[in-house]
Image (spheres, grey):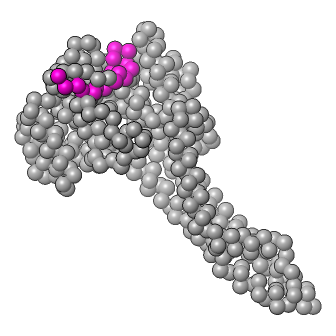
């Protein structure tokens, strides 16, 4: 009998992974459900791959976020209009914008036609559909509300895309200004300052200490600039690998949340992501513990993951989740208040989504404030750097004039 690897969420909200012998994936899913677990993915066990053994990440080849959002919106519209799932998927195959999307849609449609549920079919394409997405689709299928669930999913994806787009757009100008500053200073150090060195050498004069320092710095940048860039790239890779260590990652994540300005914005983004995902899962009928288990893996910040795990343990004991979240000191007070109100009024999903809307708006305002601080700060820094170089040149010229006099 073939073996299958599976990922599921147990009754305590924890992720369960293992290998099970069964006739097919559907049998694995059915057995997990009988055991009280929420299946996320089941696939044939082919053993560890070569890349898995040497622990090298592979470039993602699945669907992009924009493509998933478009697919979700179109599928929800087709199902709400009364189309059956097979015909809706066929339409998506025929209207797919490129071969990669066509391949993903065809695999989904073929799996559904072979008897798999849509959630199981999506769970096999781990590079395209995240765990949160698959869990919501599975809840929608179980409750017979797949069309409305997909509509909510599309809304979640569009909100996330809008928020990410706002952040990227807001950071374009500060980034270009910073690059211009680096380029201007590098040009002055490597092209302008060296032109004055022969003049002093011909007159037997010694450059002032500040000017000599800038000239030496320009020589280093001109001669070893490429090696400096390579060194920075290596340092970046080392930092990325270090962040894979749980203790280092938790420390860095906590440090980011405590930084002035940046920390407040990061907390707003974190609260918006948690509230939006958690509220949507609750409104789609996912049990509280299972919803917390899914959201925990979708947050990204390890400090917040620890807070959600504490909230999960508290919820299992019947003590609620707002108190441990408040004790963690990670989520904003507004999040805690609305979640507590949702627990008291049995409207936890609605209050979580309300909190998400507030935090998303606060994130946009925070980004505007951050850009308003970054632009003048970079401008002042660039002006100070250029002024320092020009001052050194003027000092050198004055010393040369004094020598001539």
Along the horizontal axis of the image, is 125 left or right of 202? left
Q: Residue at x 12, y 39 (%)?
A: 109
Coordinates of residue 209 in the picture (x, y in percent): 84, 72
Identify the residue at image location x=71%, y=79%. Answer: 193
Q: Quadrant of residue 198?
A: bottom right
Work out whether residue 217 or residue 159 is closer to the camera in this orientation and state it.
Answer: 217
Instruction: Please determine whether, in this image, residue 32 is positioned above or below residue 216.
Output: above
Residue 100 coordinates in the image, percent (x, y): 21, 52
Name of the residue lying farthest toward the top: 317
- Is 11 magenta? The answer is yes
Considering depth in this image, is 76 or 103 the residue closer to the camera?
Answer: 103
Give the magenta part as a residue range. Answer: 1-17
Quadrant of residue 32 within the rendered picture = top left
| Left or right: 330, with 75 as reference point | right
Residue at image point 50% right, 48% down = 367
Q: Is residue 322 visible?
A: no
Q: Position of residue 154 (x, y in %)?
A: 26, 40
- Queried whether the magenta region covers residue 292, the answer comes back as no
Give the quarter of the image for residue 25. top left
Q: Residue furthest right?
A: 405
- Above or below, comparing residue 221 to residue 292 in the picture: below
Q: Nearer the viewer, residue 212 or 143?
A: 212
In front of the other: 40 or 70? 40
Q: Quadrant of the C terminus?
A: bottom right
Residue 270 shown left or right of residue 347 in the figure: right
Q: Residue 374: horizontal and vertical position, in percent? A: 59, 55
Is residue 338 visible in the rendered structure shown here? yes
**The N terminus: image quadrant:** top left
Q: Residue at x 71, y 85 (%)?
A: 195
Height in image: 192 above or below 5?
below
């Amino acid at each position: 009998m073939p073996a299958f690897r599976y990922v599921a969420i147990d009754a305590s909200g924890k992720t369960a992974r293992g290998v099970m012998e069964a006739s097919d994936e559907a049998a694995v899913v059915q057995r997990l459900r009988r055991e009280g677990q929420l299946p996320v993915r089941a696939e044939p066990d082919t053993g560890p791959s070569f890349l898995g053994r040497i622990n090298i990440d592979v470039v993602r080849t699945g669907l992009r976020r924009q493509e998933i959002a478009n697919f979700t919106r179109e599928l929800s519209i087709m199902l709400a209009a009364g189309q059956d799932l097979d015909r809706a998927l066929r339409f998506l195959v025929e209207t797919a914008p490129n071969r990669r999307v066509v391949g993903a849609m065809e695999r989904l449609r073929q799996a559904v036609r072979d008897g798999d549920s849509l959630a199981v079919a999506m769970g096999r394409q781990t590079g395209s559909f995240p765990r949160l997405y698959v869990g919501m689709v599975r809840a929608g299928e179980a409750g017979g509300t797949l069309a409305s669930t997909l509509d909510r999913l599309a809304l979640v994806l569009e909100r996330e895309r809008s928020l990410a787009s706002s952040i990227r757009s807001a950071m374009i100008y500060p980034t270009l200004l910073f690059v211009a500053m680096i380029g201007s200073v590098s040009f002055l150090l490597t092209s302008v300052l060296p032109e004055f060195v022969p003049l002093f050498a011909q007159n037997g004069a010694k450059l002032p200490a500040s000017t000599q320092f800038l000239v030496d710095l320009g020589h280093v940048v001109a001669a070893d600039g490429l090696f400096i860039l390579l060194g920075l790239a290596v340092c970046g890779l080392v930092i990325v690998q270090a962040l894979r260590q749980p203790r280092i990652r938790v420390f860095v994540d906590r440090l980011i949340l405590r930084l002035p300005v940046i920390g407040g914005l990061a907390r707003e983004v974190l609260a918006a992501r948690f509230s939006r995902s958690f509220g949507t899962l609750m409104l789609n009928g996912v049990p509280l513990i299972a919803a917390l288990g899914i959201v925990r893996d979708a947050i990204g910040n390890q400090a917040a993951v620890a807070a959600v795990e504490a909230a999960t343990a508290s919820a299992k004991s019947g003590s609620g989740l707002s108190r441990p979240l408040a004790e963690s000191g990670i989520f904003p007070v507004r999040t805690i208040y609305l979640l507590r109100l949702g627990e008291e009024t049995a409207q936890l999903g609605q209050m979580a989504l309300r909190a998400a809307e507030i935090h998303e708006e606060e994130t946009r305002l925070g980004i505007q404030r951050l850009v308003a601080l970054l632009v003048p700060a970079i401008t002042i820094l660039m002006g100070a750097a250029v002024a320092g170089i020009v001052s050194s040149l003027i000092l050198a010229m004055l010393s040369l004039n004094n020598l001539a006099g």
